[in-house]
């Protein structure tokens, strides 16, 4: 029986990974997971942790080589892992087990939207790029809420990459390489077109400014989160964007359609002045919505730069102004605040209600959009009131007080 509550290394790990003094809760998670795993696979399991992420700014810019501000957060997918010959077996609590044959790393269209695609694709990236692969058995549990915009899928994919990295490659892969492995899995093996934001934020940890002008060598700068008097809350307003892949994909497709009309593959390759000078002609070839989404893209990249500079200077007023502007742009121009044709508009309702609470500094939709989460920044002395107001509408179980986690996906040494 594993016992961790008085383990000093575990206590330090909890402070680092979860920013918490609630050692008892995390100890119980780890101990229960270890017991489940070792009963099936034997003693000696190792722990791995992969966080969720928040998009601080940069809504739907990464897939067109844009700029983002993102951060890993203090919820995670946790795995207990043992080497296993010949195949990968992942038992996620509450889900059917996933089993992958290491000799079959081709794309399986029947795996689109399934965990099998995530695992197979991540392993395929390692093999394609000359890294070592091997079998393992893992038992996992997660408090990264699924389908609500904090990237439970990316947390899972990067987790698999880090397990392969540590077990078979001496931990030599850097964060962006692990993010690329996860990105390949999501876009080609899971069947969900995406950029690199989610996977990068999770792999790197902390607050990251990422410029994806080059996807092979993105510019990454870590920025200290110094707004210590500000609380962060995620509200799961309802719905699940897991079944809205077509609407999510249309944002990228429409931005790229605009770029193609102007002689480029991505909007980043089109100068803003050329775009605006071409709008009359563009309207004959693409929809007005595509043009509006492109306008959002150009403006959002500028907001990311302003917000990054503001965070470096601890200029809260300027940073939160950019957050609110970003939210308005997502709703009016990007048009991903609710699903097309639906009268269910939980994100718009969530942001509107959040901004009615005294002490809320900024609130906006986060992630893919259409359904799911809002991100709010609140003065710490107003957090209790904020929570109570959100509980009334969305339920206590759907309001999460989180913090920035300074460590990305990692092996937890105990």
Image: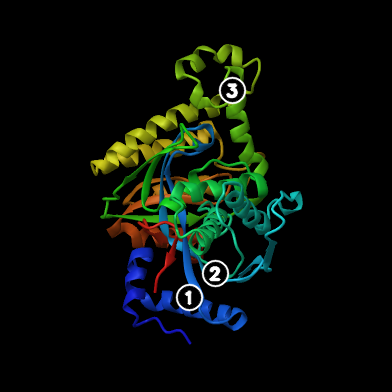
Badge 2 local density, few (<14 within 10 Å), some, or many (20+)? some
The local secondary structure at tag 3 comes to helix
* Disc nearer the start of the sequence (1/2): 1
Q: Residue at x 55, y 15 (%)?
A: 279
Q: Quadrant of the C terminus?
A: bottom left
Using the image as rendered, state which of residue 147 and residue 188 is in the foreground. Answer: 188
Q: Nearer the viewer, residue 368 or 52?
A: 52
Q: Which residue is mark 1?
A: 29
Q: Percent from the top left, x then y, of residue 130?
A: 57, 49
The dot on residue 141 is: 2
Q: Nearer the viewer, residue 40 or 367?
A: 40
Q: Is residue 309 visible?
A: yes
Residue 273 locus on image (x, y percent): 45, 15
The disc, 3 or 2, on the residue closer to the chain's N-terminal end is 2
Relative image position of residue 215 (x, y in whole percent): 50, 36
Mark pair 1, 2: CA separation: 8 Å
Query: Which labelled disc corresponds to residue 258?
Result: 3
* Residue 383 sits in quarter: bottom left
Q: Is residue 64 above or below residue 137?
A: above
Task: Give left or right: position of 153 versus 214.
Answer: right
Q: Residue at x 28, y 59 (%)?
A: 381
Q: Residues within 10 Å of mark 1 (few under 14, many from 20)?
A: few
Q: Are marks 3 and 2 in contact (CB under 8 Å)?
A: no
Q: Tell me if label 1 and label 2 are in contact, CB under 8 Å.
A: yes
Which residue is depicted at the point 47% across and 19% down? 271
Marks 3/1 in contact by CB < 8 Å: the verdict is: no
Q: CA distance from mark 3 to mark 1?
A: 48 Å
Secondary structure under badge 2?
A: strand
Task: Give the mark nearer the N terminus: 3 vs 1.
Answer: 1
């Amino acid at each position: 029986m594993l016992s961790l509550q008085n383990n000093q290394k575990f206590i330090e790990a909890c402070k680092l990974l979860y920013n918490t003094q609630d050692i008892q809760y995390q100890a119980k998670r780890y101990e229960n997971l270890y017991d489940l795993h070792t009963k099936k696979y034997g003693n000696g399991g190792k722990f791995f942790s992969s966080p969720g992420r928040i998009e601080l700014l940069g809504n739907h810019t990464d897939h067109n080589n844009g700029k983002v501000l993102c951060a890993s957060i203090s919820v995670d997918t946790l795995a207990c892992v043992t080497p296993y010959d010949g195949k990968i077996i992942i038992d996620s609590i509450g889900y059917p087990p996933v089993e992958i044959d290491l000799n079959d790393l081709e794309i399986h269209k029947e795996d689109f939207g399934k965990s099998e695609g995530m695992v197979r694709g991540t392993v395929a990236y390692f093999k394609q790029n000359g890294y070592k692969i091997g079998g393992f058995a893992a038992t996992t549990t997660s408090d990264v809420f699924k389908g609500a915009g904090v990237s439970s899928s990316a947390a899972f994919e990067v987790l698999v990459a880090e397990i392969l990295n540590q077990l078979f490659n001496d931990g030599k892969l850097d964060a962006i390489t692990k993010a690329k492995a996860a990105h390949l899995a999501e876009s080609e093996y899971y069947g969900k077109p995406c950029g690199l934001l989610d996977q990068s934020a999770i792999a790197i940890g902390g607050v990251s400014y990422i410029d994806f002008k080059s996807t092979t060598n993105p510019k990454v700068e870590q920025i200290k989160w110094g707004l210590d008097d500000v609380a962060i809350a995620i509200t799961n307003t309802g719905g699940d964007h897991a079944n809205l892949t077509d609407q999510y994909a249309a944002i990228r497709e429409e931005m790229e359609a605009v770029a193609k009309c102007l002689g480029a593959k991505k909007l980043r390759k089109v100068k803003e002045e050329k775009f605006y000078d071409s709008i009359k002609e563009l309207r004959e070839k693409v929809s007005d919505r595509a043009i509006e989404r492109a306008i959002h893209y150009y403006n959002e990249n500028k907001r990311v730069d302003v917000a990054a500079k503001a965070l470096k200077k601890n200029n809260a007023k300027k940073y939160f102004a950019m957050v609110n502007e970003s939210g308005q742009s997502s709703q009016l121009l990007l048009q991903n605040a609710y699903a097309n044709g639906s009268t269910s508009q939980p994100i718009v309702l969530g942001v509107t209600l959040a901004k009615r609470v005294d002490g809320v500094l900024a609130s906006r939709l986060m992630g893919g959009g259409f359904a799911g989460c809002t991100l709010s920044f609140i003065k710490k002395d107003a957090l209790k009131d904020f929570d109570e107001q959100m509980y009334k509408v969305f339920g206590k179980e759907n309001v999460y007080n989180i913090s920035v986690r300074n460590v990305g996906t990692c092996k937890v040494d105990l």
